[in-house]
Structure formats: structure tokens, C-alpha cells
Amino acid sequence: MDQLSRSAGTVRPGGRTARVRAAVLEAAQDELVERGFHGLTMDQVAAKAGVGKTTVYRRWGSTPGLVADLMNELANQSQPHADTGGIEGDLRANALAVLAAITDGRLGATFQAVIAAATCDEQAAEALRAFYLRRIEEWAKAVHLAVERGELPPGTDGGEVIRAVSAPLYYRLVVTREPVTPQDAERSVARTLAAARAGAFVVPDP
Amino acid sequence: MDQLSRSAGTVRPGGRTARVRAAVLEAAQDELVERGFHGLTMDQVAAKAGVGKTTVYRRWGSTPGLVADLMNELANQSQPHADTGGIEGDLRANALAVLAAITDGRLGATFQAVIAAATCDEQAAEALRAFYLRRIEEWAKAVHLAVERGELPPGTDGGEVIRAVSAPLYYRLVVTREPVTPQDAERSVARTLAAARAGAFVVPDP
């Protein structure tokens, strides 16, 4: 049992493996926030986490491996989609959750570091893609419920609606480097909803 | 006269200063594409451009200085907004121009390298912001013309319409790391236009 729980990828809550993983991922996130992906080193993460270097190398392999596991853990810790009973409330909750995440000192800096890493490292890119596709899939359920309630046209693509709410916020954050405010979140919801109600997110059956 | 044309920032087309600047910016772009911002060095750019190191240091100061001048030059070389006579055609031209830029091997890699640099360097962030704000301002004119023609409601915010067309493309490129296709460009235009026609981009007078 102890043998099993210590094998790679297996986390027993409260067990030694879980504690080591939590310490290493926290140290990796600290280093990402402070130094960026190019400043991230396995040795420094091991030292900061108080864990042997060989453990860190054996279990995570490389710094992109650390980033991938960190993004996986952040996705695990993320909230399920809102269910306010109306699509406007749900999309607003989504936009405000995205805003809160990207403007949070630690979480926002983590996303930006991984976005930067993904421009030059395929494993980091894959970790980023997996994280966002999980979040999009989760929130798309709120759109599907709205279609069932008759709030949006049948055939509305839930994932595309969720991408459309997030896109203008990330665009300001990492492309035009403009401030991202609650007003931007509200506007993104209003514009996405206007397009969705007009049927612009209906995707024809393949 | 020769003295004047060689002072920092002064470019005489065809003159020695212009030739040096063109060679240095081309070398800087090559290095950005090949090695990313963290692999960019003043010495390597000088060597590749066949220009003395002291010239490069004196004129551009640092690698973020090179990036800023490169983005400035890319903005100078960019096309004016389309004027097809209709807002749908103009926004389609905009979306396809963005798509062509970000999927171009050299130009797309340049943007991604500068987006990555901007996450950890304020001068690179400022260069990126200045580039996109110039492009947004240029294309916003096409939206203003559409308002004058009565195609879109009075008070429609042209800059916001242009941001909305680009945002989903960049979101897929650098955040969700999904493929960006002509279909994504078409969908972005259709959705933005549906929202704009519904008045969702009308910004109240301050």
C-alpha cells in the first residue's frame, strides 16, 4: 500500500507523496511568479520545497514537467461552473472569475509565465491547452443549460460562447497590455450574449 | 548633413544610418524568431548585422530597446485599413490580415516572442501596447465610416469592435494554444458584427 501510494502520479491525501507534491508545486509556482519560466530550475525548486533533488528529477523529469503538473493541479482546484438560473448571471460569474484569476498577483503571474513558456516549449503549451480546455468544457455546461431553458438558440456552441467571454480579457492582458477592469468583463458578457441571442454561435451539424 | 543623418533616431532612406538600422532590425528579428527574447543578445545581433557592437549599444541601449524599435518599424510597414465600402468586408479583411500575420512563420513567431517578453519586461510590454494601439486606431476608422454610412448604430466604439475581431484569434494562438483557421476568422467577424448591430458596442458619452 505504501509502495503503491508512492508510485509516480499517485496522490494519497495527507500521505507523504501528497505532501511532497504539494511542497514541490508550491515552490515551482513561487519560482515561476518570481523568476518566470526561464528562471525556473529543478534544483532551486527542490531546495525551496525541502525535497531531495533526485525525487524532483525522478518524478517530474524537467521544468516543463513541473509546469504541466502545476497546471493540472490548478485545474483540479478550480470551481465548477456557476448555476444562477440564467445565462446572463452565469456568464457574468464566468467573466468575473476570469478577471479575478488574471488580476490576482500570484495566479495571474503564474498564467502569464506559462503563456510565455508556451511560446517556446511544446510541453508547456500542451499543459496550457489542457488547462483551458478543461475550464471551457466545464463552463460550456452552463450554456447548454441555457439552451435547454430556451434562453439561447438550439445548436449554440457552448465552448465557443465561453471562449468569447474570456478572449477580450486575455487579449488586453497579454497582447495589447491594457488594464483589465470589471467594466471590460461586463462588456464582454453583454457583447457575447448579444451575438449568442442573434444566433451567431449556432454551429451547423457536421 | 551627414552628421545629422547619423544622429540617433534619424533615418535618411538609403543613407548609411537607414542601412545600419535595417540590418540591425532584421538581425534582431531573426534572433527573436530563432532564440526567443531570452536568447536575444546585443553582441549576436551586432555580429549578424555586420555592425560594430558600440553602434548597437549606443543606438539601441539594450535588447528591449531593439524590440521596441522593431515593433515601431513593423507598425510603420503595416497596411492602412481596408475600405471595401461595407463593414462586413472591412472586418473580414481585418480578421484575415490578423490571421495571415499570426500564422506567418516569421511574423507570427516575432509577435509570440514579444508577447512572451512583455510578460517580464516593461519596455517590451510598452512596445507591444504601442504597436497594437496604432493598429487598432487605424482600423477603427473603418468602423467610424460604417457608422457614418448608417451600417452600425451611432456611438459604436470603433476601437472596441476591432479589438473584438482580433481577440478570439489571439486567444486561441497564445492562451488555449489551439489552431487558428480562416473559419475562426469568419466566425469572429460574424459574432462581432451581430453584437455591433445589436448596439452592444455603443459606449455612452462620458
Image (cartoon, coloured by chain):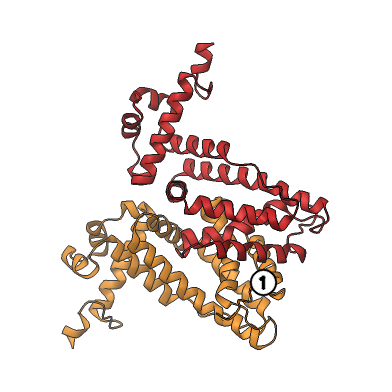
Chain colours: A red, B orange
Left or right, A129 with respect to A144, comes to left
Percent x, y of residue B107: 45, 63
Q: Is residue A198 above or below residue A73?
A: below
Percent x, y of residue A110: 44, 46
Is residue B81 in sight in this rendering?
A: yes
Q: Of A142 and A129, which appears nearest the observer?
A: A142
Badge 1: few (under 14), some or many (20 or more) residues near its Cα, within 10 Å?
many
Percent x, y of residue A170: 52, 58
Q: Quadrant of residue B23?
A: bottom left
Q: Of B173 and B100, which appears nearest the observer?
A: B173
Q: Which residue is mark 1?
A: B200
Is residue B104 in sight in this rendering?
A: no
Left or right, A146 with respect to B202, comes to right
Q: Is residue B71 above or below residue B168?
A: below
Q: Quadrant of residue A168?
A: bottom right
Say which residue appears at 62% left-offset and 81% top-offset: B155
